[in-house]
Amino acid sequence: MDSATGSVVAVQGSIAPALIAANCDSLGGWTPLWVSCYSAMAPTSFSQQGAFLLAVKPNSDGGQWTNLKGRMNFSTVGTGPGHIITLSDSNFQKTIATANNRPANDANDAFIGYDQGDGNPTRVGISFGAPQSISNYIGNVGDGKKWLERLTSSLKMFSVPVSIPSAPPAHATDPCAVGTETWDASFVYVCVAKNTWKRAPLASW
């Protein structure tokens, strides 16, 4: 339908979509309902915008049909860099004032994108960006406090131990990139210049 009406009653629950509409208003008076909407009320007047729901597979799939490609699939991305998904638009007025709503991106956008790409899908490099920070959580709602890893414009922070693989060079002139670190039971090794290793001994304490 074009515009969903209020007080819709459905019995499917999470089994299947019960309502598909171009526009949906507030759902406060509705029963548990799977709704698919193209748009919703203006965000200036309605904070609880309806979610866009996608099922990937039933949970009780018996372990079958693994490693399928995703329900949201961007077939081509072309030459990078660029955004694939703009998560937060820092200049939305510019976006809606631009034909096709695809203006140049902005430094303070939050996004999932690609910073390497020449039109060949085998040579795409994925990027993430945000104006404040990028944080990783495990078993947490994303509370802004108990992150395990956080990147800001000035610092990379970890709140868990960091493990560096042991792959010590055999010689001081073995190939390496500047800044590479590794170790073994006796030394810590650092690549200080191209193909130039230095090492420091480890001691018990």
Image (cartoon, helix red, strand yellow):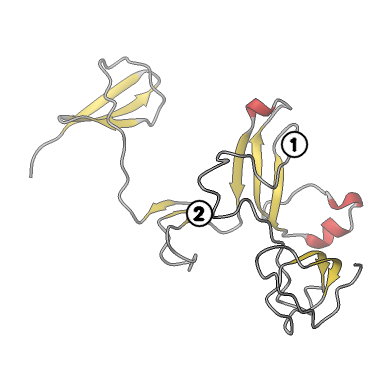
Q: Residues within 10 Å of mark 1 (few under 14, many from 20)?
A: few
Image coords of residue 61 (percent x, y): 55, 49
Which residue is identified by label 1?
Answer: 75
Q: Look at the image and tell me in which quarter the C terminus lies.
A: top left
Q: Look at the image and tell me in which quarter the N terminus lies.
A: bottom right
* Mark 1 / mark 2, whichever is N-terminal: 1
Where, by quadrant of the figure, is residue 16 drawn? bottom right
Residue located 64% across and 27% down the image: 123
- SS at mark 2? loop
Position of residue 168 relative to residue 152, above or below, is: above
Image coords of residue 88 (percent x, y): 69, 59
Position of residue 25 relative to residue 137, above or below, is: below
Pair 1/2: label in front: 1
Position of residue 30 relative to residue 128, above or below, is: below
Q: Tag count in the figure?
A: 2
- SS at mark 1? loop
Residue located 67% across and 70% down the image: 13
Identify which amino acid the numbered label 2 is placed on. Thr
Left or right: 39 with respect to 186? Answer: right
Q: Residues within 10 Å of mark 2 (few under 14, many from 20)?
A: few
Image coords of residue 78 (percent x, y): 75, 32
